[in-house]
Image: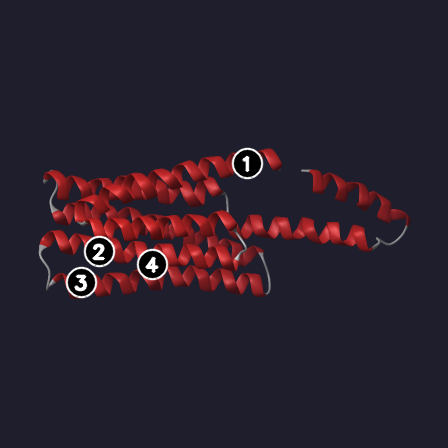
């Protein structure tokens, strides 16, 4: 990376004397870039994991809603099983970051990881309560739409928290798809989230991972 090369030259220079303001700023920028990498995680892991989760999970839900190929219980089990696994990966990653980064950054990472677990726990509690009052297709929509609302909000907030533009944009993308799908109905929502959110996150994870490797 160009910044790293410059910093390496400046470190050699530092042997003859203290760094000047410009050199110090470059060193700070290098540390900031490393911190963002740790806080943001590898895009291939962070985004592609969710992409596969939604592609398969919402795909199963669409098979139930559109064709009756699966039972509702099986479809929701597949969706939330994958989402729980993806959430666990995210929380473990954030926890690892908390052990590698000290100070306010570590505290933010831990709190952000807890927010995912608590957010989805609230979603499950609300959906269970509303499920008693709605017909089966609408029950599926409530579970799916509320969970994706939490995901969208937390991705947007994570992007703002870590100054990660791709993360924030993906959160906005999920929010827009969720609104369109919710208005369209249970089966269209499942299809839109499967290919739009799932496929979009897989592509984003691969592209961003490749960009970071080329820039690193």
CA gap between label 2 and label 3 equals: 8 Å
Q: Residue 27: image x %, image y %?
A: 73, 51
Residue 55 against residue 96 in the figure, above or below: above
**Which label's residue is closer to the chain start, 3 or 4?**
3
Mark 3 closeness class: few <14, some 14–19, many ≥20 residues within 10 Å:
some
- Point out the tag, 4 or 1, that comes first from the N-terminus: 4
Residue 126 in the image: above or below residue 21: below
| Vertical relation: 119 (above or below) 199 | below
Residue at 64% across, 53% down: 32
Residue 183 or residue 214, whichever sits in front? 183
Query: Which of marks 3 and 2 precedes in the sequence?
Result: 3
Q: Position of residue 210 (x, y in %)?
A: 52, 34
Q: Secondary structure at mark 4?
A: helix
Q: Give left or right: position of 176 versus 57.
A: right
Q: Which mark is residue 143?
A: 2
Q: CA distance from mark 1 to mark 2?
A: 35 Å
Q: Quadrant of the N terminus?
A: top right
Cα distance in 3D space between marks 3 and 1: 42 Å
Write down the quadrant of residue 99 in the picture.
Answer: bottom right
Give the number of the mark in front: 2 or 3. Answer: 2
Name the mark on residue 150: 4
Residue at image point 48% right, 55% down: 159
Which sits earlier in the primary sequence, circle 3 or circle 1?
Answer: 3
Using the numbered discs, state the Cα–Cα distance from disc 2 to disc 4 in whole angstroms.
11 Å
Give the labeled residue for mark 1: 211
Tell me whether circle 3 and circle 1 mark residues in contact (CB < 8 Å). no
């Amino acid at each position: 990376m160009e910044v790293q090369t410059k910093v390496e030259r400046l470190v050699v220079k530092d042997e003859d004397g203290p760094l000047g303001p410009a050199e110090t700023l470059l060193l700070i920028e290098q540390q900031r870039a490393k911190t963002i990498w740790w806080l943001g995680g590898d895009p291939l892991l962070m985004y592609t994991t969710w992409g596969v989760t939604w592609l398969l999970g919402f795909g199963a839900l669409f098979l139930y809603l559109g064709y009756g190929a699966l039972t509702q219980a099986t479809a929701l089990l597949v969706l939330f099983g994958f989402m729980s696994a993806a959430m666990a990966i995210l929380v473990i990653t954030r926890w690892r970051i908390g052990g590698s980064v000290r100070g306010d950054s570590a505290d933010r990472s831990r709190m952000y990881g807890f927010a995912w677990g608590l957010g989805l726990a609230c979603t499950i509690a609300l959906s269970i309560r509303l499920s008693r009052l709605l017909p089966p297709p609408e029950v599926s929509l409530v579970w799916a739409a509320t969970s994706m609302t939490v995901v969208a909000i937390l991705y947007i907030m994570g992007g703002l928290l870590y100054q990660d533009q791709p993360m924030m944009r993906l959160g906005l993308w999920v929010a827009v798809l969720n609104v369109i799908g919710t208005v369209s109905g249970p089966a269209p929502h499942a299809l839109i989230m499967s290919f739009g959110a799932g496929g979009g996150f897989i592509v984003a994870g691969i592209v961003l991972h490749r960009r970071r490797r080329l820039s690193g």
